[in-house]
Amino acid sequence: MTRALAPAALLLSALLLSACQKAEEAKPAEPAALVAPAGSDDMAWKDYLGQVVARNQAGVTDRVFPYYLPMNASTPAEGDQDGKTMYDRQLENVAAVVQRTVLPGNMLAFGSPDSAKMADLIVTAFTGAEPNALKGSQVLFIGAAADNERVKAAVEAAGAKYIFVEAK
């Protein structure tokens, strides 16, 4: 009788092993770690920031509003008639959005090769915001760990869920 069970046990073992291999093949591979560009190439940074935003959209049910500052954003560009810098323009834009409030389900995403300057922009734009101006929305800051806490305090004071990703 044991001789008759041996082939059945062998067949059952082969089926179980095959099922385990298929289950492991079905598992999605972990995404590769993202590495921030070393220089200030705008296209490389925008690509990197886009990938980080895509990986951190859990809970976003509406739109993502990305904000980017290039290096030297505080220097006026040649030909600007009004003398405003990219930083000035972006600050006006973000401050207006925060003052109007942001609907639940939306995300504001911020990133720059100049983390400190972007952190300055966020803190300034969020200063004086209503306590529930961003309730139900999210703010993603991609920057240096040294800037995290001050940005977090300003964002959470406006009622948003804060997400920080260190650019490294």
Image (tube, grey):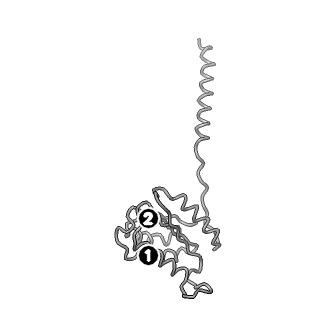
Q: Which mark is residue 162?
A: 2
Residue 120 showing in the rendered view: no
User: Which residue occupies the extreme top position in the image?
Assistant: 1
The percent position of residue 117, horizontal first and vertical second, equals 52, 77
Q: CA distance from mark 2 to mark 1?
A: 19 Å
Residue at image position (40%, 70%) is 153
The image shows a total of numbered marks equal to: 2
On the image, numbered disc 1 is attached to which residue?
Answer: 96
Q: Label 1: state its secondary structure.
A: helix
Residue 94 showing in the rendered view: yes
Residue at image position (61%, 63%) is 35
Instruction: Tell me the kind of residue under disc 2.
Output: Tyr
The percent position of residue 14, horizontal first and vertical second, equals 63, 27
Could you tell which of marks 2 and 1 lies nearer the N-terminus? Answer: 1
- Residue 30 in the image: above or below residue 127: above
The percent position of residue 41, horizontal first and vertical second, equals 65, 72
Q: Residues within 10 Å of mark 1 (few under 14, many from 20)?
A: few
Q: Which mark is residue 121?
A: none
Foreground disc of the pair 2, 1 = 1
Where on the picture, by quarter, is residue 152?
A: bottom left
- Residue 40 in the image: above or below residue 8: below
Task: Please state, as top left, top right, bottom left or bottom right, where the N terminus lies in the image.
Answer: top right
